[in-house]
Image (cartoon, rainbow, N blue to C red):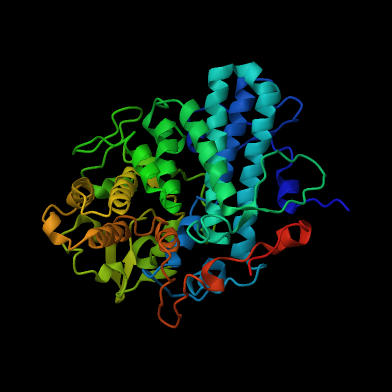
Amino acid sequence: MKKTLLYIILAAGVVQLTSCAKKEFLNPIPTNSISDLTAFDSKDRIEGQVRAIYASIKNSGMYGGRYQIFNDIRGEEFMNDRTNVVTGFDIWNYTPSNSSTNSVLNHWSRAYYVINLANTFIDGMNAKGTNVVGATLSGNYLGEARLLRAMSYYSLLQLYARPYWDGNGSKPGVPLRLKGNTGSDNYALARATVAQVYDQIIADLNYAEQNLPLNNGSAILNTTRAHRNTAIALKTRVFLSMRRYTDVITEANKIVSATAPYTATSGVPHALQADYTNIFKAPYTTTESILSMPFASNETPGTQNQLGYYYGPAAFNGGNGEYSLLSTGIIGNVGWLPTDKRRSFVQVFSGKSYLTKYSVASTFTDYAPVIRYAEVLLNLAEARVRSTNTVDAQAIALLNAVRGRSDATTIFTALNFADAAALADAIITERRIEFLGEGLRGTDITRLGLPLPAKPGVNSIPATGQQYIWPISSEELLLNPLCVDNN
């Protein structure tokens, strides 16, 4: 009997036509549905479909906020203050063991919704769209679609599959769907291995690098739409997750100069901002922001989904204060000095410390960060240390670049590190400070094979534990007989 997955039914034949007004690059909300028979008849219709994929991936269940939050609260930095499963209490205490819980269901379905939009678009471009817009523009659009597909598959691997280090990618990953589904059919598909899914992610990002424009022509588009350096930056993250450190170095060197001040010398001129706080305030379009998900007053991440709502208390921005900062987490690190500019985003209200990086009051339309240039620098630093197993001089210089722009009083030298492991630990600590509340801690823990940390009332989970990864969505298991759950 043929069965049709719910997310495929929802995504089937989704093609959109949007206005070319500049404001819709910021708010790519589709306005009209059109027949798939004419979806690729004009540049405007094709462009509208690309924007629709962006609009879908910045849904609150994906990179619009909740994916970052899920990965933050799996770490040791935050205290859950509401015990509300709707806002991630089960994620925080490592108990999303039921494959029917909202978080497990919603992220899975949204990721595959985006994947199917990308697949349907790719199929349509190959069949007709390329002839309409020409090879160069077609390559641009296809590069964006494949990059967004890669981001979706990467997010699925981080939550629903064993880390790459466990069996060198041989463990079950997720179903690898590469063809657009626009109608009822038999969609039974077994899970590909983790390595196979990562191979596809890399292939998509390689294609994107080769076909995306060097520059999108404006600060807003360089922040909210993919360009060549976006693909390169994301590859440094992917290869780091695979522990392919020499590949991290190869990719990072494409957009990181050999010496300080570190900048991208081709494509969009990425660089660290002199003032860290400027990254998280309007207009959110600094050269450090490689990719962010934009929001505006007429388009919000949705109730109980926004970064500011989760992390900001009512006295600060009208948020709900779902998560305060644990004193035993990174804010208790004695090496993170009070004079560090990043400390300004840790404020005390009613005796509790909160992250105030996201300051826009309700309706909490702060841009959701996906990847910044500082991450590329620290990815490169870590890869150099782990690949050479030395107290690497360039790694120290990259670490100093990130620390120094917020804390000029701390300057690391080789004498600060007894060995390569000590330097690697310092880089990981810097990541915890630099990206607090940006969704990197959970993936750092699992890619390094660390236990999920103990928290007040919550036991640690070893890297071999069942709760280390999420179960597969119950809807997938019900409607895809070839897909098996995590044991």
Residue appearing at x 32%, y 43% in the figure: 373
Judge left or right: residue 60 versus residue 294: right
Give 459 or 339, whichever is nearer the viewer.
459
Residue 208 visible in this rendered orientation of the protein: yes
Residue appearing at x 34%, y 42% in the figure: 249
Q: Outermost residue, right direction?
A: 1
Up-down: is 349 above or below 123?
below
Judge left or right: residue 248 versus residue 13: left
The count of marks equals 0
Give 405 or 311, whichever is nearer the viewer.
405
Residue appearing at x 41%, y 58% in the figure: 308
Up-down: is 294 above or below 410?
above
**Quarter of the rendering occupied by the C terminus:** bottom right
Residue appearing at x 64%, y 17% in the figure: 132
Figure quadrant of residue 315 = bottom left
Up-down: is 435 above or below 147?
below
Residue 367 visible in this rendered orientation of the protein: no
Residue 415, image x, y percentages: 11, 59
Residue 186, image x, y percentages: 82, 47
